[in-house]
Image (cartoon, grey):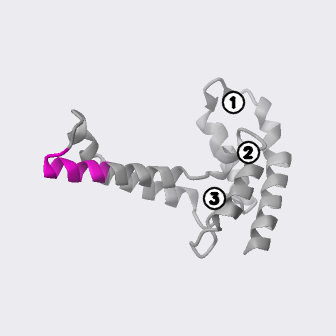
């Protein structure tokens, strides 16, 4: 898989340099980041290039951590690169769902310390559903 990761990183680098960097001066990219319209356009380009969520392979498996680091480095040639490639949005949403689930457990055991524990615990299932919707929207696995 090492060779595949290197080839993937080279494809991502070429994609970011050729198709994403020109958008850095786009008026839809402001002080608070790109507009939803621009993000959608960038992700459509990534999907058309077969590079949306490049760290997830067509069979649903993932490239190795080292390969992911190479791909992330290539994506990071532009601040818009990771946005266009939709890196780790769903992963972080699932992390939040797991954290909320842990808070729910502490709440049930009576060991939750935060005044907001009940609100966080109530969001566990919703966050997991939102994460799964993000996976589906991104077309994970290309």
Crowding at mark 3 (Cα within 10 Å: few <14, some 14-19, many 20+): many
Q: Give the CA distance from mark 1 to mark 2.
A: 16 Å
- Residue 81 horizontal side relative to residue 139, left or right: right
Q: Is residue 103 magenta?
A: yes
Q: Give the CA distance from mark 1 to mark 3.
A: 21 Å
SS class of the residue under badge 1? strand
Q: Quadrant of residue 29?
A: top right
Residue at the disc numbered 1: 29
The boundaries of the magenta stretch are 100-111
SS class of the residue under badge 2? loop
Residue 95 horizontal/vertical position (percent)? 43, 52
Which residue corresponds to the image point at 68% horizontal and 52% vertical from the top-left? Answer: 44
Asked whether 111 or 62 is in front, the reply is: 111
Q: Earlier in the sequence, mark 1 or mark 2?
A: 1
Residue at the disc numbered 2: 76
Residue at the disc numbered 3: 53
**Total number of numbered labels?**
3
Residue 1 horizontal/vertical position (percent)? 72, 75
Q: Give the CA distance from mark 3 to mark 2.
A: 14 Å
Residue 97 horizontal/vertical position (percent)? 36, 52
SS class of the residue under badge 3? loop
């Amino acid at each position: 898989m090492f060779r595949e990761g290197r080839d993937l990183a080279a494809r991502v680098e070429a994609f970011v340099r050729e198709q994403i960097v020109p958008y850095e001066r786009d008026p839809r990219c402001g002080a608070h980041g790109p507009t939803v319209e621009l993000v959608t356009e960038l992700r459509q380009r990534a999907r058309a290039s077969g590079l949306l969520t490049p760290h997830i392979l067509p069979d649903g498996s993932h490239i190795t951590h080292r390969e992911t680091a190479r791909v992330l480095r290539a994506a990071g040639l532009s601040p818009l690169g990771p946005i266009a490639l939709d890196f780790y949005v769903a992963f972080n949403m699932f992390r939040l769902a797991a954290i909320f689930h842990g808070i729910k457990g502490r709440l049930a055991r009576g060991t939750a310390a935060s005044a907001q524990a009940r609100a966080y615990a109530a969001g566990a299932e919703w966050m997991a559903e939102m994460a799964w919707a993000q996976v589906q929207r991104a077309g994970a696995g290309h």
